[in-house]
């Protein structure tokens, strides 16, 4: 029996800090630079905004839906507050909550996914059953359900959105961790009797950096969409504190009088989301090369792997 | 086996100056290849990985993979140049006039369609009507020996065995009675008997239809058996071409000579010699001869001037080397007989002693009562085909497989199943090396940390001591110390396998289990790994359990051999006597089915 | 030299076919039922048991101890938890999911029109969107890295990032209020009449949904088609002499069905989430808007029913997609 002589699979050069390398390469590509630029633009506006706003976001400075005038550059919103100031102040809370929810979701999901893959057996089934239950609702509905019970509450929002991310993250990481666990180099370490937690930490996790990075990017984007969406329908971040999601809803009835109150938050949200997604796409390509970056999208969706890790 | 057909007639296939480049950078993957094949003749194309042989094979059909394109050259089939045809005509020529048999039949057949339609398609797209196609398919099945398999046409590919799949693919290739057929390692992954069947089928079909065939392979023995002429490819160029027997007995190019010195034989115990270094990538070739950096007999001219392909003193035998000219040819290779070293003295106690080992996967019994022992400092080869149980055996011994009964004794102490139950001593003393060098090293760790990892597991050493031991291990496998900070993807397959060996050695084990560790490596790389192992075996008085399917290889490394057939040991004994005078039928079958030299007894 | 001819028989496919499929259906259905059971407990716990109970919520400021007590009795809130849960669950399963706390109508009446409205949107958007996405995806993959592929891929990347309500609001701005003013800004379908009788009201919501789902499915189909086009069997087909269109039709299409089915399934699920926000934007009387209203008014039986409905829908679509994938993958359903 002749056995195929293996040619080395194409592996991108492993460096000491894969993370830094990934981000740097992504940032250098066209897509990545564009995505990063857009994202940073909006993030900076969101962070610095409250300090440079001309008026307080809750102050009534003009009549409802008044057209732009000096000092009120984007006109008035539905209650006569300064649209510009509200827009500048309306981003940081959204970003903060989204970041917190993402961090929670990814951490819980990653641990669950890796443990499920590596430990397998009943632990795997248990974790997957729990995530099935959570996955049985759309994320928005899950958060809505929670909110409907306790009332809108920032901590609850973070928890609800975070936990609704966890199963999806777990699924993707489990798929790739399963793939990695089967590889000979993991067996080579097991065969010397190393304990499971050590194997998971030192051998498996470092090989999941690529899908993990991509998941973080995608989840962050979803968090923003969900929290803005919830705020839009009134169940997320609460008035009177400004946030872009609820602003869009508040101001759309007056859109024929003064459209700025609707269009500017829309624009900012759109730019942020597009930037984030584009940069995440660039990271995926930096990690895996173009073909396998496309494959990662499938893993994300189908929960199967096949050589998605480098 | 190597009849030279007269070349008075016009060759069926005449390839001139064929060059394939990468679309992006224009680097030449196949460089200005010129060759010819006569009707009914098989030309073997031999090369190692990275030589461009597969690309060359595809290019003979005017096809290039994504990212590559055919830059220039001509492929004249019965006088007509394929590359000058408009794309529609070229496409209709494929499958009907020139066809291809790929390496892996499992992936070559569409998994979502049944076999019958795929076979018929090979005919109907070239204008054969459905009725005639159905008849022809029946004929084809008979020609490849599949006519008595019921239900084959309505089966899906995954329901067929590897050998059956490959014969279906061959049938598809011969369907329209092409004039040229290109085969790319068609016997990969098949067991010895099936391989034999496939080779015989190919040979008889070629002879019957007067087809010119190009047989691309890395397996020197197979090529030697099936082809009348051979071309040796190195780094995209043909470096030697000539009649098979003559090329193999009297090779002229230093690369060919180096290659042949790495090839084991079933009938003699030969020393295997590898070649240092590896071939240059396209776009990174040195000026002058591409092989010069590795060549043991190079002269100054070789580094600066590219040699041309010239006759070497015998007609029809050309070589691309400055040292070869029509008036001077290199002498035939010296014989490389080996002594396999001392077999262990009868008084020394076995280091491993196995009695009645029976192993299962679920309800499937894979090993049925295996008894064997390994003496200290000895290499025992465990030979068998797929399904013989040899891999399961290795896994039971190493602790990766748990479902077994019987007794495994290591130095008079019983070894429990599974890693969790074994003592640290046992875990340390019995080390295991995996088959695939590209998968057995964590890509995120440096070579240094990979090799040192077992040290952390088995003892508490200071950083200095660890580094010393790691360096010593690297040295033992002939790798330079600056590899410590490199990552696996910077190393070649052979180097990676040596790192795996270094990792196993760093804790000073008594037994090394080598599970097909060279099966995925090129012949010359395999030779150097085997060299390294043999040296280690004698220097450190190591016992080796060498699992393989490759009988000839056994002869160059093992003192004793055990032959496994379907979970049962059918024969055991000193290598030379088992291979020279096999007692069991199965051993004889294995020996005779192995390609290469004809029957020995 | 012996030559063994393999006479290994090939397992006939017909008799084997039913087993893996049937057992898969049974197993997944059982799992689905368990999941739904757990979901029901979660929903019940969330809505009935947390502080600020139902009665309080309904009566709000006008609650007095007497009216509270009466309502609690009426709602069965004083009974033990298990009993409450059981009566709700059994009611749900026998087609009697309680009555709205707001107007007293049976939940079924409140909800049935909405279900039809939402279903209509999903089906129309789903069918059109799938058709667009699959054909565009295959086209882009077969003309990889050329003009169409580049523009469509970048467009997909950008559009898929946008939140649904942003898309909806932008569409309204363009077609309704600022730029073109040809379509209505809201879609209040008459309750009691089927949605297709008022087509102009449906245009913008459907377009929004299509825009939301097409890019995602497009990218998936493109990725799978590319992978298939790179496969060995497609290369073999090319070397047999088939033309690219023939290859796409005979070799690629059957092989991308499994992944495409999964993509469609996921898209439907994604739609079910997106529909909530889109319905709110357009004031469209569907399940999503109904849920939001119910949450706003704390109409607990309606909330419970709609969430369970959504969960059951999710589970069913998941099983359906996996089943269809299995049917389309001979390798998995037909054994050796």
Image: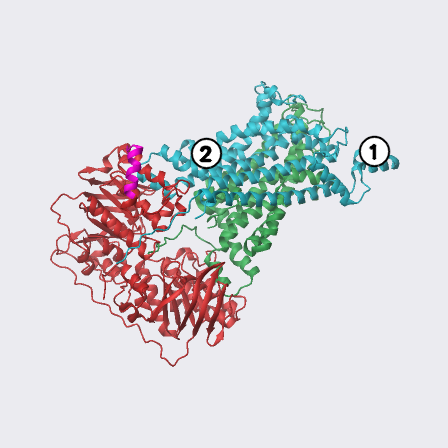
Chain colours: A green, B red, C cyan
Q: What stretch is highlighted in magenta?
A: B126-140
Disc 1 or 2, which lies upstream in sequence?
1
Q: Which residue appears at 61% of the width and 48% of the height? A: A129
Q: Which chain carries label 1?
A: C
Q: Is residue B562 above or below residue B8?
A: below
Identify the main secondary structure in magenta.
Answer: helix
Q: Is residue A254 left or right of residue A29?
A: right
The secondary element bearing badge 2 is classed as helix
Residue A60: % across, % down: 73, 29
How dense is the environment of label 2, judged by Cα within 10 Å: few (below 14), some, or many (20 and up)?
A: many
Report how far apart the C-alphas of labels 1 and 2 lie in the structure. 56 Å
Q: Which of the 4 image quadrants contains residue B344?
A: bottom left
The secondary element bearing badge 1 is classed as helix
Q: Is residue A7 visible?
A: yes
Residue A213: % across, % down: 53, 47
Q: Which residue appears at 45% of the width and 37% of the height? A: C222
Nearer to us in this view, B106 or B307: B106
Q: Is residue C22 above or below residue B128?
A: below
Disc tally is: 2
| Magenta span includes B130 | yes
Q: Is residue C143 visible?
A: no
Q: Is residue A150 above or below residue A116?
A: above
Which quarter of the image is occupied by the N terminus of chain A?
bottom left
Residue designated by label 1: C61
On residue C137, which mark appears?
A: 2
Nearer to us in this view, B519 or A121: A121
On residue B97, which mark appears?
A: none
């Amino acid at each position: 029996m002749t056995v195929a002589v293996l040619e080395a699979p194409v592996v991108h050069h492993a460096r000491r800090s894969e993370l830094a390398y990934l981000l740097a390469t992504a940032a250098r590509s066209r897509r990545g630079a564009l995505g990063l630029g857009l994202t940073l633009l909006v993030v900076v506006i969101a962070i610095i905004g409250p300090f440079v706003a001309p008026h307080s976001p809750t102050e009534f400075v003009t009549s409802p839906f008044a057209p732009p005038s000096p000092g009120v550059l984007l006109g008035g919103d539905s209650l006569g507050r300064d649209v510009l100031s509200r827009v500048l102040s309306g981003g940081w809370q959204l970003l903060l909550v989204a970041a917190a929810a993402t961090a929670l979701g990814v951490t819980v999901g990653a641990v669950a996914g890796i443990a499920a893959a590596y430990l397998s057996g009943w632990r795997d089934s248990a974790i997957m059953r729990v995530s099935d239950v959570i996955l049985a609702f759309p994320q928005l509905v899950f958060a809505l359900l929670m909110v409907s019970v306790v009332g809108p509450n920032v901590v609850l929002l973070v928890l609800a959105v975070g936990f609704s991310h966890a199963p999806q993250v777990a699924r993707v990481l489990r798929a790739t961790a399963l793939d990695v666990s089967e590889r000979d180099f993991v067996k080579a370490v097991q065969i010397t009797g190393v304990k499971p937690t050590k194997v998971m930490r030192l051998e498996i996790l470092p090989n999941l950096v690529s899908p993990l990075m991509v998941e973080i990017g995608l989840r962050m984007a979803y968090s923003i969409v969900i929290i803005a969406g919830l705020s839009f329908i009134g169940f997320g971040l609460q008035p009177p504190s400004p946030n872009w999601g609820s602003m869009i809803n508040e101001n759309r009835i007056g859109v024929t009088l003064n459209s700025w109150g609707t269009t500017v938050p829309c624009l900012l949200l759109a730019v942020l989301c597009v930037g984030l997604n584009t940069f995440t796409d660039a990271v995926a390509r930096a990690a895996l090369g173009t073909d396998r970056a496309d494959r990662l999208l499938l893993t994300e969706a189908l929960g199967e792997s096949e050589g998605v890790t480098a | 086996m190597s009849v030279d057909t007269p070349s008075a007639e016009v060759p069926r296939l005449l390839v001139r100056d064929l060059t394939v480049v990468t679309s992006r950078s224009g680097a030449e993957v196949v460089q200005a290849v010129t060759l010819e094949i006569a009707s009914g003749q098989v030309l073997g194309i031999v090369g190692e990985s990275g030589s461009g042989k597969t690309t060359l094979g595809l290019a003979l059909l005017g096809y290039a993979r994504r990212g590559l394109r055919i830059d220039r050259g001509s492929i004249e089939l019965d006088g007509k140049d394929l590359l000058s045809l408009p794309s529609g005509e070229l496409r209709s020529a494929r499958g009907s006039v020139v066809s291809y048999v790929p390496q892996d039949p499992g992936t070559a057949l569409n998994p979502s369609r049944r076999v019958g339609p795929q076979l018929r398609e090979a005919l109907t797209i070239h204008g054969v009507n459905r009725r005639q196609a159905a008849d022809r398919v029946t004929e084809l099945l008979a020609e490849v020996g599949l006519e008595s398999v019921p239900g084959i046409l309505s089966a899906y590919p995954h329901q067929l065995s590897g050998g059956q799949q490959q014969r279906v693919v061959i049938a598809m290739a011969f369907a329209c009675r092409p004039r040229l057929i290109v085969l790319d390692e068609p016997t990969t992954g098949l067991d010895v008997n099936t391989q034999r069947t496939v080779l015989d089928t190919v040979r008889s079909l070629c002879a019957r239809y007067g087809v010119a065939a190009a047989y691309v392979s890395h397996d020197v023995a197979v090529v030697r058996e099936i082809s009348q002429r051979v071309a040796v490819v190195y780094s995209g160029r043909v470096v030697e071409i000539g009649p098979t027997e003559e090329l193999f007995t009297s090779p002229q190019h230093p690369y060919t000579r180096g290659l042949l010195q790495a090839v084991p034989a079933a009938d003699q115990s030969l020393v295997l010699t590898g070649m240092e270094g590896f071939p240059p990538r396209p776009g990174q070739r040195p000026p002058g001869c591409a092989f010069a950096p590795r060549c043991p007999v190079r002269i100054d001219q070789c580094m600066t001037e590219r040699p041309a392909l010239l006759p070497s003193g015998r007609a029809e035998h050309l070589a691309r080397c400055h040292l070869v000219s029509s008036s001077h040819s290199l002498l035939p290779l010296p014989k490389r007989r080996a002594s396999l070293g001392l077999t262990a003295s009868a008084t020394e106690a076995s280091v491993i002693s196995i009695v009645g080992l029976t192993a299962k996967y679920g309800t499937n019994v894979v090993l049925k009562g295996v008894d064997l022992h390994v003496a200290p400092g000895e290499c025992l080869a465990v030979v068998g085909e797929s399904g013989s149980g040899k891999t399961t055996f290795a896994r039971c011994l190493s602790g990766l497989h748990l479902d077994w009964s019987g007794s495994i004794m290591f130095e008079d102490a019983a070894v429990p199943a599974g890693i969790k139950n074994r003592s640290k001593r046992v875990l340390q003393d019995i080390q295991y090396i995996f088959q695939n060098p590209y998968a057995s090293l964590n890509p995120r760790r440096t070579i240094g940390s990979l090799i040192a990892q077992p040290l952390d597991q088995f003892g508490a050493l200071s950083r200095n001591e660890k580094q010393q031991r790691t360096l010593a291990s690297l040295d033992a496998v002939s790798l330079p110390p600056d590899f410590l900070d490199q990552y696996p993807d910077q190393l070649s397959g052979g180097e990676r396998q040596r790192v795996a060996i270094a990792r196993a050695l760093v804790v000073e084990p008594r037994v090394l289990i080598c599970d097909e560790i060279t099966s995925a490596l090129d012949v010359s790389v395999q030779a150097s790994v085997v060299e390294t192992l043999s040296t280690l075996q004698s220097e450190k008085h190591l016992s080796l359990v060498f699992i393989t399917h490759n009988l000839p290889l056994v002869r160059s490394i093992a003192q004793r051999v055990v032959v496994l057939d379907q979970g049962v040991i059918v024969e055991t004994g000193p290598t030379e006597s088992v291979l020279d005078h096999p007692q069991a039928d199965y051993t004889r079958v294995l020996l005779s089915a192995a390609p290469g030299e004809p029957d020995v007894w | 030299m012996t030559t063994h001819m393999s006479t290994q028989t090939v397992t006939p496919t017909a008799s084997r076919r039913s087993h893996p499929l049937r057992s898969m259906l049974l197993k997944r259905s059982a799992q689905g039922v368990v999941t739904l059971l757990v979901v029901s407990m979660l929903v019940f716990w969330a809505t009935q048991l947390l502080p600020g109970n139902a009665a309080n919520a309904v009566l709000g400021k006008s609650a007095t101890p007497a009216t509270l007590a009466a309502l609690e009795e009426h709602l069965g809130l004083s009974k033990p938890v298990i009993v409450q849960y059981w009566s709700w669950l059994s009611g749900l399963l026998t087609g009697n999911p309680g009555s709205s706390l707001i107007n007293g109508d049976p939940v079924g009446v409140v909800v049935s029109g909405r279900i039809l409205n939402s279903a209509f949107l999903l089906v129309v958007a789903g069918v059109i969107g799938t058709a667009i996405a699959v054909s565009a995806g295959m086209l882009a993959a077969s003309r990889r890295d050329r003009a169409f592929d580049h523009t469509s891929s970048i467009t997909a990347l950008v559009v898929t990032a946008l939140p649904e309500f942003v898309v909806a609001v932008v569409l309204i701005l363009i077609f309704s209020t600022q730029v073109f003013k040809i379509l209505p800004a809201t879609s209040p379908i008459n309750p009691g009449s089927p949605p297709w009788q008022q087509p102009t009201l449906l245009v913008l919501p459907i377009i929004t949904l299509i825009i939301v789902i097409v890019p995602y499915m497009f990218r998936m189909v493109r990725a799978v088609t590319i992978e298939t086009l790179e496969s060995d069997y497609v290369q073999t087909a090319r070397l047999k002499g088939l033309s690219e269109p023939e290859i796409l039709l005979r070799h690629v299409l059957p092989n991308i069905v499994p992944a495409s089915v999964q993509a469609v399934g996921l898209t439907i699920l994604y739609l079910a989430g997106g529909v909530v926000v889109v319905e709110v934007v357009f004031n469209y009387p569907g399940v999503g808007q109904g849920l939001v209203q119910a949450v706003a008014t704390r109409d607990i039986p309606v909330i419970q029913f709609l969430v369970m409905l959504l969960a059951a829908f999710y589970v069913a679509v998941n099983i359906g997609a996996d089943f269809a994938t299995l049917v389309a993958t001979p390798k998995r359903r037909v054994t050796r």
